[in-house]
Amino acid sequence: MTESELLVDCLRRLELCGINYMLVGSMAGNYWGIPRSTHDIDFVIEYNETQVNTIVKAFEDHFFIQPISVASGLRPPHQFNALDNRSALKVDFFQVAGDEYEFERFRRRKRITLYDQPAWIATGEDVLLHKLRWHKISPTDRQLTDARGIYLVSGSELDRSYLEHWAEQIGVSDLLDSVLKD
């Protein structure tokens, strides 16, 4: 199973079980920017304790997923994962949590079609900002390269005032300035 086939499979499962989600991370960066290989798929999801079993049942046929892990995702660090038994690729799930920006990012998600599959995805602005935020936390060239790729591909469509406002709020204005200058 390829990364794109796994992505479509996960999108279908999330759509069918009715969990609010958005695609984030490198796969979302590939949509808005310059594509690169990735070794996992990242989703932000909105769920509560009554939906833990729904999530497990949606994935348990072809994934290694544990109810205790899904339930623990409701508490910090608000994360769990599922391992695809067919490909050994990992799918990371992050609960909507954190600061005001994280909730705004989820609220702004966009409905698109990806590989003929309806999908919710983080906006280009929010993928770019999140890449900068991760670079600030754990500096890697990959995060900055992804952010620059999003700007190069989608720059004319990006809301600069939104980028500048939230970059200041989350402490990445200096990084945003360097991306916008390149």
Image (spheres, grey):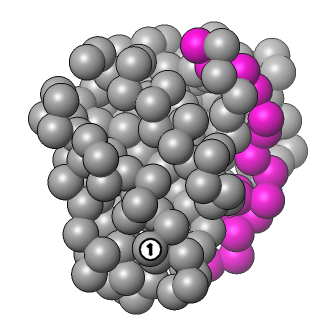
Corner quadrant of residue 154: top right
100 inside magenta stretch:
yes
Query: Label 1: which residue?
Result: 53
Q: Quadrant of the N terminus?
A: top left
**Residue name at image x 39 percent, y 19 percent:** 5
Using the image, determine if residue 72 lies above or below residue 86: below
Closer to us: 163 or 57: 57
Residue 139 visible within the image = no
Which region shows up in magenta?
99-115
**Residue name at image x 67 percent, y 34 percent:** 119
74 inside magenta stretch:
no
Q: Quadrant of the C terminus?
A: top right
Amino acid at pointer 1: Asn
Expressed as whole percent of the image width and height from the top left, the position of residue 98 reads: 55, 78
Q: Circle 1: is it few (<14), some (14-19), or many (20+) Cα within 10 Å?
A: few
Instruction: Report whether 2 appears left or right of 76.
Output: left
Using the image, determine if residue 159 lies above or below residue 2: below
Expressed as whole percent of the image width and height from the top left, the position of residue 42 reads: 41, 45
Expressed as whole percent of the image width and height from the top left, the position of residue 29 reads: 51, 28
Q: Secondary structure at mark 1?
A: helix
Expressed as whole percent of the image width and height from the top left, the position of residue 21 reads: 62, 53
Residue 41 visible within the image = yes
Closer to us: 55 or 4: 55
**Residue name at image x 61 percent, y 68 percent:** 46
